Amino acid sequence: MATHSQELKIFAGNSNPNLAKDICSNLFMDLGSATVSQFADGECSISLQEAVRGCDVFIIQSTCNHVNDNMMELLIMIDACRRASAGRITAVIPYFGYARQDRKARSRDPISAKLVANLITAAGADRVLTMDLHAAQIQGFFDIPVDNLAGGNIFVKHYRNLIRKSPDDYVVVSPDVGSVARARNFAMKLGLNLAIVDKRREKANQSEVMNIIGNVQGKNCIILDDIVDTAGSLCGASAALKEFGGAANIYACATHGVLSGPALGRIAESPITELLLLDTIPYPSTAAPLNKISYLTTAPVFAESIRRIHEERSLFTVENN
C-alpha cells in the first residue's frame, strides 16, 4: 500500500487548465508548478518544477480532444511523479476518454477502455477519480481503486429551483433505453415522472428515433445524458419530443460536452431551449459561443473529493448528494 506525507500537491496537464485552477481555488491552494509542452515532433515534454517526494499527488487531466495527446500527457506526468518518489498518485480524470469502447461490439474489435485502464495503472497511478463513466463496469477494468462521481447530482440542485413552482409541468426524459437507469435515479431525486425515447442506432454517431414511451404532451421535458458528442441523438430526441410527443419546452443536460463535428450547428437548429453541461471538458476554443449552451462547475465536487481522499475519509456523501 502506498504511503504518503501530509503534504498535498496538485498538478495539471493542458486539457482543462481552468477547471484545475478552480479546484485549487476551492482547496485554498496553488496549482503545482510544472512545464507541460511538446517537442518539435509532437512528443510530450513534462518537467516538474517542485519536489513531490513522499507527497500525496493529484494530477488533473481530462482525456478529451485531443484525446491521444492529453492521454500521453497524463501518463508521462504520472511517470514523472512516480520517478520523483511521490508517496501516492491519484489521476483525476473528469472526462475519461475511450469509455465508449468498453466491449466487443463486433468480432476482432478491441476493448480500448480496458487498454487505457492498463496504461494508467502501468504508468504508476495508485487511484483514479473520475465522473460519470459512460459504462460503470469500467471501474472493474482497473486493478486500483476508482471513484466514479455522479454529475447528475449537480443538475439536481440546479433544476430543483426551476421546477419548484410547478413540478407537475415537468418530466425527465431518457434519450435512449441504455440511459434509463441514470434518468430514473435523476427523476426520483427531482420527484418527477420519467419518459423514454426509444431509438434504433444504425451506425456510430447516427441514430433513428422510433417511439416515445410515456406522456410528454404539454410538458417541459428535461433530457438527461452523460455525453453529447455529435449531438445527433440528443437533437433527434428533442425533435421527436416536440413533433410527435407534443412537448412544450425542451431542456437538456449532460455531464460531458464533447461537441464534435456538427454538434454546435445541430444544437443551434434544434428545439432545445437550453443545454446545460458540466465543465469536465472545456467549450471548443475555436468555436463561437452558443447562447443555448451553459456550464455548471464541477470544481467544488472534485475539490471536496480530493480533500476526503487525502484525509482518508469516505466519499459516500459526495457521491450520493
Image: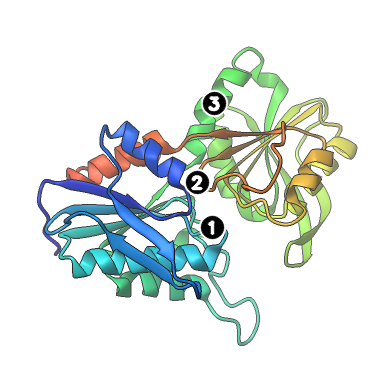
Query: Which quadrant does the C terminus fall into?
Result: top left
Cα distance between the residues tagged 3 and 2: 17 Å
**Neighbour tally class for label 1: few under 14, some 14-19, many 20 plus, Cα within 10 Å:** many
Q: Tell us which disc is closer to us: 3 or 1.
A: 1
Q: Is residue 279 visible?
A: yes
Cα distance between the residues tagged 3 and 1: 25 Å
Q: Looking at this view, name the residue that lies furthest to the top.
A: 165
- Residue 46 position in % (x across, y down): 34, 64
**Amino acid under disc 1:** Cys
Q: Secondary structure at mark 3?
A: helix
Badge count:
3
Asked which colour scheme the image uses, the reply is: rainbow
**Amino acid under disc 2:** Thr
- Residue 31 position in % (x across, y down): 30, 44
Q: State if disc 2 and disc 1 touch (CB < 8 Å).
A: yes
Look at the picture and state if 34 lies above or below 98. above
**Amino acid under disc 3:** His
- Residue at the disc numbered 2: 280
Q: Is residue 99 visible?
A: no
Q: Which of disc 2 and disc 1 is earlier in sequence? A: 1
- Residue at the disc numbered 1: 64
Q: Along the line of sight, which residue is nearer the eye, 173 or 93?
A: 93
- Residue 263 position in % (x across, y down): 74, 50
Q: Tell us which disc is closer to us: 3 or 2.
A: 2
**Neighbour tally class for label 2: few under 14, some 14-19, many 20 plus, Cα within 10 Å:** many
